[in-house]
Every structure is written in C-alpha cells, then in structure tokens.
Amino acid sequence: MFLLLFFAIALFDSANAQSHVNVCQADLLFLANRVRVKAVLHGGSLVVVDDANPSSSFTIDRSNILRLSEQSGFFTINTRRPVFYRMRESMQFDFQF
C-alpha cells in the first residue's frame, strides 16, 4: 500500500523541476526466497536495490507496469515486458513492506 501511494504521487507530480526520491525497506519474494531490498521511487521509475547483491539491482519504468495489486500485506507488480533479475527474467514481483 505504501508503494502504491508513492506511485500515485509520482504519476501526478511531474510538474516539479526536481523529482523527489522515496526509499523504503522491503522483502522481495523471488523464486521461493525472501530477498531484502530497498525500493527507491525516483521520477517515473522504481529502482529495486538488492541489499545482499547490489549488482543484481534492477529498475521498473512506469511505462512497463501492467498492473499493481495489494493483497494480504503483499504488493504485486506485473510488468508488460520481462525484467532481468538474478540471472532470470520475470514479469511479476511480490513485495512485503
């Protein structure tokens, strides 16, 4: 829910000369593992910084988001195109904040 609010703000807050950076801790559920990440909202992109392996970090551009949903404390992002993360491509990312 927290991230959904940030995305809504970013969608309507494009008139500012300087974009705000919002950072929050989250767990990313990926291949039956729980990965600790930082979710960084900057402009029209969500940057996911992998705490354990920063070189595996990735970004999801607003134009690549197909659907956002929240259920039982989990926030899911479905993308239009695959995103490469930890040697695999995925079109669904589940976060718990």
Image (spheres, rainbow, N blue to C red):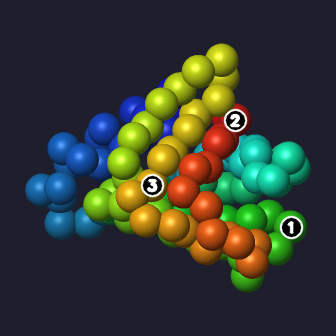
Write down the residue under mark 1: 52
Helix, strand or loop for disc 3 = strand
Helix, strand or loop for disc 1 = loop
Indicate which disc, 2 or 3, sits on the residue closer to the N terminus.
3
Image coordinates of residue 83 in percent, x first then y, are 54, 68
Image point (43%, 65%), residue name:
81
Indicate which disc, 1 or 2, sits on the residue closer to the N terminus.
1
Crowdedness near tag 1: few (<14), some (14–19) or many (≥20) residues, C-alpha within 10 Å: few
Alpha-carbon distance for marks 1 and 2? 17 Å
Check whether the beta carbons of the residues at disc 1 and disc 2 lie within 8 A of each other: no
Q: Amino acid at mark 1?
A: Ala
Image point (69%, 35%), residue name:
96
Question: In this view, which residue lies farthest toward the bottom?
Answer: 55
Alpha-carbon distance for marks 3 and 1? 24 Å
Q: Is residue 69 above or below residue 31?
A: above
Q: Is residue 90 visible?
A: yes
Indicate which disc, 3 or 1, sits on the residue closer to the N terminus.
1
Q: Amino acid at mark 3?
A: Thr
Q: Is residue 50 left or right of residue 24?
A: right
Q: Nearer the viewer, mark 3 or mark 1?
A: 3
Image coordinates of residue 11 in percent, x first then y, are 24, 47
Write down the residue under mark 3: 79
Q: Nearer the viewer, residue 66 or 19?
A: 66
Q: Amino acid at mark 2?
A: Gln
Write down the residue under mark 2: 96
Helix, strand or loop for disc 2 = strand
